[in-house]
């Protein structure tokens, strides 16, 4: 009797799996869509596409704009972004405006294909229908690129998209994301929409749980991006690292500020998105992040680093960052007042020294030269000594980084 029941349960499970697999794997066979939008609507959609930072993930390194194929590394495997051009076979050419809005705000592409939350529908859920329609009109006005993105590289069971139905039941709802600051001014309200929805900042700057869900009780308190981390951007944490509303405004416009330059995953956000926004919108973003009544910005604390660390700095770093840490324009950022040095979490500082950074362009013909990595030039003890020197000398942080920590962060 028990054996028969088990067999029936297995059979039912197989049938249910088969139905869900079929439902998930269906292809859209609707007609090619023709969109008649005004020039103003298309231009508005172009601006919103920039504000949504779509190109950063939907354009591969050597690919056509918005044709997808960009690899997104996750703890569960590699997910390749979708083709957002009007291609009828590989893109959104058969999608209606309603289909597009549902994909953005619910994570379901037509006819019934669940998207992985690497596509930030968990933030885009707050997007207005008017804005998603404008983005759709702009994307559909572009040239179709008939290129299929690579297949995702995900092991079982993460390669079963039907499992996202359960994930959504557990972790997705239509409630707005929480506020990361306090305010009520029109500028703050606009900034909230830009930060929480269009720019989807929480997707990187909020820690994630074991199933990849955002931990809402730690909203904007920093997240992992693989080798680098997205720092805590709550008002108190920003102020503790020396940021002001005015400096943030400058940073989003240019990628450069007294606290340093945009690097790693933040550089494309500036280069492909925020530099193209109006000054008013970037001021709104800065206002929301700091709040209508920002906390007092803490002055940079300086100390006296070790003699060994200073010698390593003079030998390895001062040629670009200057002997006194003042930096050199279009070469390297200043160490004095640098936000990365002032961060209690030294992950980004350590990995920058280990891995180096590529040459990076910035708006207004500004540039930062490439920085060599020192993983093969300095041993763990030397890098720990150097990191501690930087933290004490210009970061106001303790000299508590050990060689064991450096070893653990080597690739």
Image (tube, grey):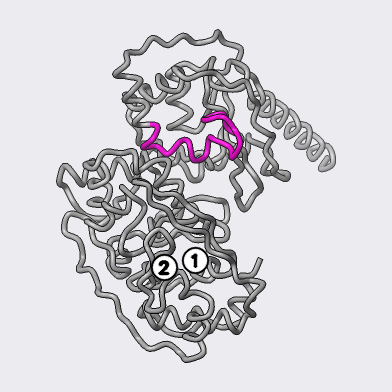
Say which residue label 1 marks.
348
* Of the pair 91 and 102, the residue shown nearer to us: 91
* Of the pair 144 and 152, the residue shown nearer to us: 144
Q: Which residues are magenta?
A: 49-68
Question: Do tag 1 and tag 2 residues touch (Cβ < 8 Å)?
Answer: yes
Q: Magenta includes 50?
A: yes
Residue 38, horizontal then vertical, whole percent:
32, 13
Residue 118, horizontal then vertical, whole percent:
54, 42
Figure check: 313 above or below 89: below
Horizontal side of residue 271 vs 65, given as left or right: left
Residue 377, horizontal then vertical, whole percent:
64, 75
Task: Count how many numbered circles sit on residues in the image.
Answer: 2
Q: Main secondary structure of the magenta part?
A: loop
Residue 316 in view of the camera: yes
Say which residue label 2 marks.
340
* Image quarter in which the C terminus is found: bottom right
* Of the pair 156 and 205, the residue shown nearer to us: 205
Question: Residue at left 61%, top 12%?
Answer: 29
Q: Find numbered disc 2 in the image and state the secondary structure of the residue it sits on.
A: helix
* Of the pair 161 and 141, the residue shown nearer to us: 141
In the displayed orientation, state which residue is furthest to the front: 319
* Image quarter in which the N terminus is found: top right
């Amino acid at each position: 009797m028990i054996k028969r029941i088990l067999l029936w349960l297995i059979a039912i499970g197989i049938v249910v799996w088969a139905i869900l697999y079929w439902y998930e794997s269906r292809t859209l066979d609707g007609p090619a869509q023709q969109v008649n939008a005004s020039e103003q609507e298309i231009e508005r959609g172009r601006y919103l596409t920039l504000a949504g930072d779509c190109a950063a993930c939907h354009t591969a390194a050597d690919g056509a704009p918005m044709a997808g194929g960009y690899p997104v590394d996750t703890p569960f495997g590699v997910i390749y972004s979708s083709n957002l051009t009007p291609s009828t076979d590989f893109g959104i050419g058969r999608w209606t405006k309603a289909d597009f809005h549902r994909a953005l705000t619910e994570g379901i592409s037509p006819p019934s294909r669940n998207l992985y939350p690497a596509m930030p529908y968990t933030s885009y859920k707050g997007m207005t229908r008017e804005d998603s329609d404008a983005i759709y009109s702009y994307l559909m006005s572009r040239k179709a690129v008939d290129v299929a993105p690579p297949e995702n590289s995900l092991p079982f069971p993460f390669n079963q998209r039907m499992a996202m139905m359960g994930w959504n039941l557990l972790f997705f709802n239509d409630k707005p994301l929480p506020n990361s600051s306090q305010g009520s001014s029109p500028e703050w309200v606009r900034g909230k929409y830009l930060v929480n929805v269009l720019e989807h900042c929480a997707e990187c700057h909020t820690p994630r749980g074991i199933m990849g869900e955002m931990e809402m009780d730690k909203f904007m308190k920093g997240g992992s991006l693989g080798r680098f981390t997205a720092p805590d951007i709550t008002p108190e944490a920003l102020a503790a690292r020396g940021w002001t509303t005015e400096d943030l405004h400058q940073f989003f416009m240019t990628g450069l500020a007294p606290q340093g330059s945009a690097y790693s995953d933040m550089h494309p956000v500036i280069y492909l998105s925020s530099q193209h926004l109006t000054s008013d919108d970037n001021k709104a973003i800065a206002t929301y992040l700091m709040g209508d009544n920002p906390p007092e910005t803490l002055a940079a604390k300086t100390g006296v680093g070790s003699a060994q660390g200073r010698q390593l700095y003079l030998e390895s770093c001062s040629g670009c960052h200057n002997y006194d840490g003042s930096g050199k324009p279009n070469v390297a950022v200043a160490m004095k007042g640098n936000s990365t040095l002032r961060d209690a979490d030294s992950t980004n500082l350590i990995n920058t020294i280990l891995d180096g950074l590529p040459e990076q362009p910035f708006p207004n013909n500004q540039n930062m030269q490439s920085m060599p990595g020192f993983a093969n030039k300095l041993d763990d003890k030397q890098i720990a000594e150097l990191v501690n020197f930087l933290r004490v000398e210009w970061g106001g942080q303790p000299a508590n980084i050990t060689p064991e920590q450096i070893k653990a962060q080597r690739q």
